[in-house]
Amino acid sequence: MSSKHAGVLPYQTIKEMISQNTIEAETAIKKSQIQPSSLDLRLGSKAWRLQASFLPGAGFTVADQLHELAMHEIDLSSGAILEKNCVYLVLLQEKLLLPQNVNAISNAKSSTGRLDLLTRLITDLGTEFDRIPNGYSGPLYAEICPRSFSVLVKTGTRLNQIRFRRGKVIINDQDLMNLNKTENLVGKNAVVDGGISFSVDLECDEDNVIGYKAKPNAPLIDLDKIDYYQITEFWDGIKAKSGCLILDPGAFYILMSKESVTIPPDYAAEMAPYLAMVGEFRVHYAGFFDPGFGFSKAHSSSSRGVLEVRCYESPFALRSGQIIGRLIYERMAERPDILYGSDLNSNYQNQRLKLSKHFRQ
């Protein structure tokens, strides 16, 4: 690979990995799959309905566990419905033959998370979801559990993405504070502690919603249909009284960060949940922010972070400005040839409160 620097591997290096068969696939990898700092992964034709979620564990392949946990096999070639609250495993089209100094991390794509579609990567011998060790060689699987909506998927559907890394990539707190001063990552009042914090925006006038709550019994969503569905069939718009929202146990919400988020061209970021002690809820799913997200040379970013929030066992009163997550910034091995935004006609650049691309905005 051309770049030997430590950091997240960029667009041009991923292209090189594909040409060198470090990343292989059943069918040719499309240019549109390659993002500034990640690669979109595609569902294959084989899927299984599972009794339960699982990790194979050290010394075992995914196929070893399927004999015990698979209830039946599903052919995705012509499309299939993944039902709400059921667990599925899908063999992905891509597989890896990583060098010994390269590891990887996976996350759901933004649109996947905004549909409350829990999607996690599994590898042979894996002891953690979404983590691929240095030098991994083998197939990739996606575990999928729709939580709020049943969905129609087929071979080639892209639900998650993978980011490749070499060496030390995470920026320490001191460097992150300095970077925030020069690049205005989330604003001057940022709290830096194992990442840079962001808070929730629950302020609105009487005419605007501050978020959406998934309806408990909604129709099927065909993931191939873009800008298609009426919001009101699937979501209730919500308003907060005096900047406070009471989260219902088990409910799923789409909210917005108070801060605008900037990812400079030489950096990438991942959204991580804040400490559990902040409340009975979790911000989860879509985690990757590409180089160029919200970036402006004039530092006038207007791209908010969209937050996917699920409440746990008891109701929780969430207040505007409350810290609910953090961004972990990572160095790129080199600047990507393309950036998030105008280079890719990206769906969520300059976003505020925004549902997935499947809904009429």
Image (spheres, rainbow, N blue to C red):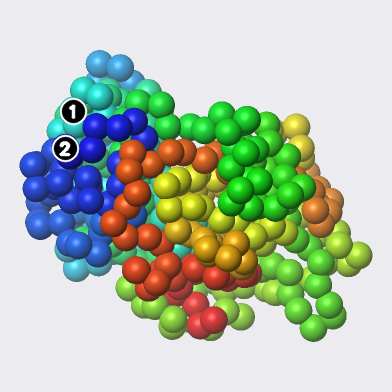
SS class, disc 2: loop
Of mark 2 and mark 1, the one earlier in the sequence is 2
Residue placed most toward the observer, 142 or 356: 356
Q: Residue at x 72, y 45 (%)?
A: 190
Q: Quadrant of residue 253?
A: bottom right
Q: Residue at x 58, y 33 (%)?
A: 175
Residue 1 image label: 2
**Looking at the image, do the residues carrying marks 2 and 1 touch, with CB atoms under 8 Å apart?**
yes
- Residue designated by label 1: 99
Q: Amino acid at mark 2?
A: Met
Residue placed most toward the observer, 40 or 226: 40
The quadrant of the rendering that contains the N terminus is top left
The quadrant of the rendering that contains the C terminus is bottom right
Q: Nearer the viewer, mark 2 or mark 1?
A: 2
Q: Is residue 250 above or below residue 351?
A: above
Query: Where is residue 7 shown, x and y percent of the image?
Result: 36, 35
Residue 62 visible in the displayed image: no
Q: Amino acid at mark 1?
A: Pro
